[in-house]
Image (cartoon, helix red, strand yellow):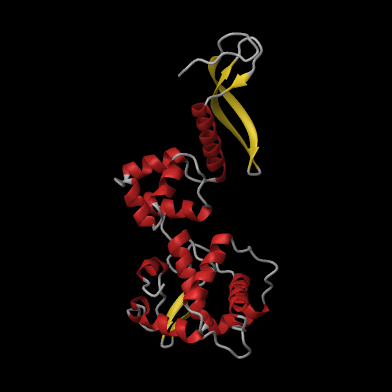
Amino acid sequence: MKAIHCPRGHGPMELKKLHKEKTFKGVDISYMGEAFVCPVCDLEAGTVQTAGDVQRAISDAYRKKVGFLTSREIKSLREANGFTQQQLADAMNVGIASIKRWETGMIQSRSMDHALRIQLQDDIQPDDYTGNREIDLARIKLIAKTFERIFGKRLLKAGDKFLFLAKYLWYADMLAFRRLGKGLTGASYAAITYGPQLNNYRDLIKPIKDSDVNDVEPLSEEEFRIIHQVAEKFPNEEDVYNAAHREKVWQESPTGALIPYSRANELTEI
């Protein structure tokens, strides 16, 4: 590495490993980084390479603190499992650019961290019937209201049994799981005569309608995009109803059986 001279005229600076502490994304972390230090005035300076190494150290210190896989762990686990970057990307249904970024310092989301662990760690298994999320009735209502705003009409109707709404929720949850490694609502879906439906929907309809959407985890930008994609694909209730009935995932499920989220990649209508 090319030597750097102190800009204050004190001669060559020395490359040293430094222990640093800072608050990053609201979390207090400590990390080791390299920098050129003037032996006279203690001025610190860096190069493009050392700056990149420092950013990666900060990223990994944060990931370790919040319980995420670090960049080195992702790479070492991938190689230990015999995956190329492209193979891991294909298994997770993400672009190879995401794998490259996570291995070089960019912080993955919590849902993507879980998806990585499912692929790379034998002791991690997905919750196949709730989409890796605890059921949240208020969030179901929030998503239903979001669909209502997009369509300009009510879906949470008096006396309604979620015949059509459940199909919109199912597609949104499955698409989110396929894309993010985590559903939107935590709901389980059963295969019934009229298509995919919220499991135990008769017991859930009133609590969902009575829930408070102001006391719920807000939707992320990507989750909004997923809901809009479903709405744009199925602008009419008959569209989503008929599409759900064409899905082999539903056709091949025994009546009353839960439909696993792991079959999200088999959906053909969206």
Residue 100: percent from the left, percent from the top? 41, 44
Asked which quadrant contains residue 265, the reply is bottom left
User: In the rendered view, does 122 fall on the left or right side of 10?
Assistant: left
Pick the quarter of the image with the C terminus. bottom left
Residue 52: percent from the left, percent from the top? 51, 32
Residue 50: percent from the left, percent from the top? 51, 27
- Vertical arrangement, residue 227 with respect to residue 255, above or below: above
Q: Which residue is drawn at 36% across and 81% down?
A: 246
User: In the rendered view, does 82 fall on the left or right side of 164?
Assistant: left
Pick the quarter of the image with the N terminus. top left
Viewer-closest of 56 and 63: 56
User: In this rendering, does residue 122 appear at all?
Assistant: no
- Vertical arrangement, residue 133 with respect to residue 44, above or below: below
- Vertical arrangement, residue 236 with respect to residue 112, above or below: below
User: In the rendered view, does 91 fall on the left or right side of 146?
Assistant: left
Q: How many badges with numbers are in the image?
A: 0
Viewer-closest of 98 and 29: 98
Residue 228: percent from the left, percent from the top? 54, 70
Q: Which residue lies furthest to the left in this view?
A: 82
Q: Residue at x 37, y 79 (%)?
A: 250
Asked which quadrant contains residue 212, the reply is bottom right
- Vertical arrangement, residue 187 with respect to residue 34, above or below: below
Q: Residue at x 39, y 56 (%)?
A: 92
User: In this rendering, does residue 119 appear at all?
Assistant: yes
